[in-house]
Image (tube, rainbow, N blue to C red):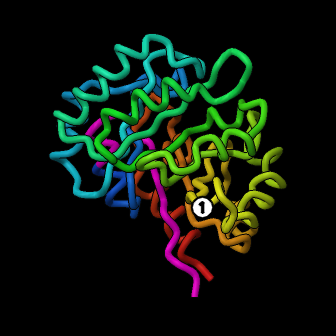
Amino acid sequence: MSTRAVLEVIALDAEDAVAAQAGGADRLELVTDMAADGLTPSAETVAAIRAAVDIPLRVMLRLADGFAAGDVRRLVEVAGRMREAGAEEFVLGFLDADGGVDLDAVERVVGVLDGCRWTFHRAIDRAADRDALRKQLDGMPGLDTYLTAGSATGVDDGLPTLLAEAARGAEPGYEQRVLVGGGLRLDHVPVLRAAGIDGFHIGGAARPGGWAGPVSAAAVGEWRRALDGP
């Protein structure tokens, strides 16, 4: 018997959050500014969404477009403010100029999260060496998920990598849940589920009207049914 798959939906505001929960989302990723691929939302937005729904929320810790950490001192301050606003789960990921994991930045930010659970996001898809990144992060407090398409260009190109990594689940650095997102379509679901992958992340797929429009409970429901199907 396979476990129920986790469906995570990107929410920009409380309206999105309510629709995503109604459609069957298990968790939300809270961001702002999708033109920059998702940055840290305001503490007010986090608090409003927390008040509107009762499913888990993961808050993006990212201050600028790209995968460099930037001002780590400010990142640490923002992470602290999010904790004060009630955030208990997070999303982050930083690379250095050579495409390696920026371990110093990750450690400093994780240090203020008090053991909260977090996702290393799609920075892994831009890493020079995915395997080295996973091994360097192995044992990092709170890290329980990798959000990845398997490729910087999306799931179509990344599928072989996703399937290969899912098969390594017992190895050090591979115990974390694989949360697939980035050009993910419903037709990818059967092959990913067959490989034992049980995490799925959607953004635009939950918004029939595009990013200018809200999350659709019906669109989320279609994904819920696909993930729960035989």
Instruction: Please state which amino acid type lies under the numbered disc 1.
Output: Glu
Say which residue appears at 48% left-offset and 34% top-offset.
92
Percent across and percent down for residue 23 are 39, 60
Quarter-wise, where is residue 74 in the image?
top left
The question of residue 111 being in magenta is answered with no
Residue 35 horizontal/vertical position (percent): 53, 20
Q: Is residue 19 above or below residue 24?
A: above
Badge 1 crowding class, 10 Å Cα cut-off, few under 14, some 14 to 19, many 20 or more, is some
Residue 29 percent coordinates (x, y)? 41, 43
Label total for image: 1
Decide if residue 221 is on the left or right side of residue 202. left
Position of residue 35 relative to residue 230, above or below, is: above
Residue, x 38% and y 26% (percent of image)? 40
Nearer the observer, 140 or 58: 140
- Pick the front one: 221 or 174: 174
141 or 75: nearer the eye? 141
Q: Left or right: where does residue 189 sit relative to residue 26?
A: right
Residue under label 1:
175
Residue lying at 66% horizontally and 37% vertically, measured from the top left: 124
At numbered mark 1, what does the secondary structure look like: helix, strand or loop? loop
Q: Is residue 8 magenta?
A: yes
Q: Which residues are magenta?
A: 1-17
